[in-house]
Amino acid sequence: MPGSRKLPTREELRAWREFIETTEALRARLAARLQRDTDLSTGDYTVLLQLSEADGTRLRSSELALAVGWERSRLSHHLGRMERRGLIRREECATDSRGAEVVLEPAGARAFHEATYPHLRAVREFFVDALTPEQITAAAGIAAALRTHLDDGAPAPGAHRTTAPATAAETASE
Amino acid sequence: MPGSRKLPTREELRAWREFIETTEALRARLAARLQRDTDLSTGDYTVLLQLSEADGTRLRSSELALAVGWERSRLSHHLGRMERRGLIRREECATDSRGAEVVLEPAGARAFHEATYPHLRAVREFFVDALTPEQITAAAGIAAALRTHLDDGAPAPGAHRTTAPATAAETASE
DNA sequence: CTCCCATGATTGACGTGTCAATCATAATGA
DNA sequence: TCATTATGATTGACACGTCAATCATGGGAG
């Protein structure tokens, strides 16, 4: 027999390329839109969202890392940039001297609130409006399947809260 | 009536988050795997794939940009890094003094051939094996729908060759 | 022929991500 | 108690991406 069948077929590969390239483009497009409308990056938005919903609009750095699913060093770098811009502030943690608490600054809260609506509109425009309801359901299923597969046998860098609720702020419900 | 219905519903938003975060994780995971196995980045791989299949294993810079769907400045930066590592070489173009031709170097060809099998195995492992055949088809359909939606009303940065054939090198056919 | 602008490509600045190393404090155990 | 290890977090180096600016050449319009 010719080469062992551990490689994708032509069709599978075509699907793969279309999928990965398109999701990449989607990500880039949404980031550009957010940048254009709000001077926040998608990373900023993610962080601010979590902080907005946290008790006292503050979180331990490690909890924040878990919530957004980032490596700690990535979060550190990002918080450094956000702190320089006055969006957040870092404080020492009372209960653990090693730890840090990330606190939402007024400027950060303001920027987040101004960004929410344009961002969600963009999500609707680029994702929701592009797909049929069935495709949206299928997309969620595909994502879940991929995630599961990634998670077992994974170095589990972000772990990630799989059961994230769609919160008030996320839906910008009136 | 309460706020105009231009925003995603809770469910749509949940699907969105799961989708975008998972595809991000998938991308990162595959990049890490390629890096681990081959000392090529996914960007390197993409460029080398196009060059490998080009006539004379060389391409005009602009054609390469079109083929991979990147902005020119991105390609310039990337080629600079690849050139430093001896994977490719840049030559002046005979027919247009402004233009540049990108030429595959032996080291680049070698690196690409060594990377092909591990990379495709990883695609199979992280994408193909994670999904049912129906899901793979659905994924392709979703990607196509998203791409179409992105393309109209787009600043069309990469344009992108939508009808890309799955070539011999891509499938690593024996 | 000469200006003007379009095109092909590069550059610099800066934000973003990853990896490995580091550092301080906490927790553990002999 | 004190050495050891684990944990929370930051840092530095470097690859990657985007944007705006730049630069040289090509190709008309007059």
Image (tube, coloured by chain):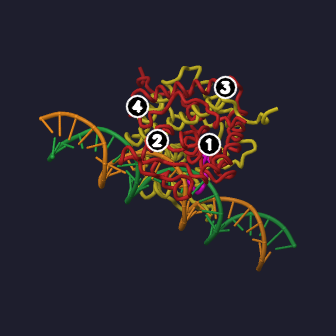
Chain colours: A yellow, B red, C green, D orange
Where does label 3 land, which residue? B135
On whether disc 2 and disc 3 are found on a single subunit, the reply is yes
**Residue B85, can we see it?**
yes
Q: Earlier in the sequence, mark 4 or mark 1?
A: 1
**A91 is higher (above) or lower (below) than B143:** below
| Image quarter of the C terminus of chain A | top left
Q: Label 2 sits on what residue type?
A: Ala
Where does label 4 land, which residue? B154
**B17 or A52, nearer to the observer:** B17
Quadrant for residue A125, please give it.
top left
On whether disc 3 and disc 4 are found on a single subunit, the reply is yes
Tag 3 subunit = B
Q: Which residues are magenta?
A: A66-75
Q: Earlier in the sequence, mark 2 or mark 3?
A: 2
Percent across and percent down for residue D17 are 48, 46
| Image quarter of the N terminus of chain A | top right
Q: Residues within 10 Å of mark 4 (few under 14, many from 20)?
A: few
**B40 or B17, nearer to the observer:** B40
Percent across and percent down for residue A68 are 58, 46
Q: Label 4 sits on what residue type?
A: Ala
